[in-house]
Amino acid sequence: MGPVGIETAGIGGLGFQEILLIVVAAVVLFGGKKIGDLGKGLGEGIRNFKHALKGDEQTATAEVKKDEVEAKR
């Protein structure tokens, strides 16, 4: 009987080293600022999508305007 393998927890079978390599490659290719902007935009998009599903368009619009004012500061 051979040794029992240890399963790694990851995303779709990706381990820590693979995820780290992907993150490092993304930072090298795009730069830290663009990745931060991408994350911020993705978060805002998800938030607006959730508000639209709830039918709360006025609140979503108000939050977008609030975020734009804060970003200009």
Image (spheres, rainbow, N blue to C red):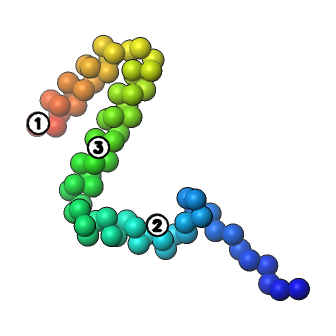
Give neighbour class at mark 3: few <14, some 14-19, many 20+ (Cα, 10 Å): few
User: Label 2, label 1: how many angstroms apart (C-alpha)?
Assistant: 33 Å
* Residue located at (23% from left, 62% from top): 30
Kindly identify which residue carries mark 2. Answer: 19
The circle drawn on residue 7 is none
Q: Which of marks 1 and 3 is nearer the N terminus?
A: 3
- Residue 1 vs residue 14: left or right? right
Secondary structure of residue under mark 2: helix
Give the answer, above or below, for where 26 lies relative to 68.
Answer: below
- Residue 8 vs residue 57: left or right? right
Q: Nearer the viewer, mark 1 or mark 3?
A: 3
Residue 61, quarter of picture: top left
Q: What residue type is labelled 3?
A: Lys
* Residue located at (29% from left, 43% from top): 40
Residue 8, quarter of picture: bottom right
- Residue 1 vs residue 37: left or right? right
Give neighbour class at mark 2: few <14, some 14-19, many 20+ (Cα, 10 Å): few
Secondary structure of residue under mark 1: helix
Secondary structure of residue under mark 3: helix
Q: Which amino acid does label 1 sit on?
A: Lys
User: Label 2, label 3: how many angstroms apart (C-alpha)?
Assistant: 20 Å
In the image, residue 29 lies at what x, y percent? 25, 67
Kindly identify which residue carries mark 1. Answer: 72
User: Label 1, label 3: how many angstroms apart (C-alpha)?
Assistant: 14 Å
* Residue located at (44% from left, 21% from top): 53
From the image, which quarter does the N terminus lie in? Answer: bottom right
Q: Are marks 2 and 1 in contact (CB under 8 Å)?
A: no
In the image, residue 39 lies at what x, y percent? 32, 47
Give the answer, above or below, for where 22 lies relative to 60.
Answer: below
The circle drawn on residue 40 is 3
In the image, residue 72 lies at what x, y percent? 11, 36
Q: Which of marks 2 and 1 is in front?
A: 2
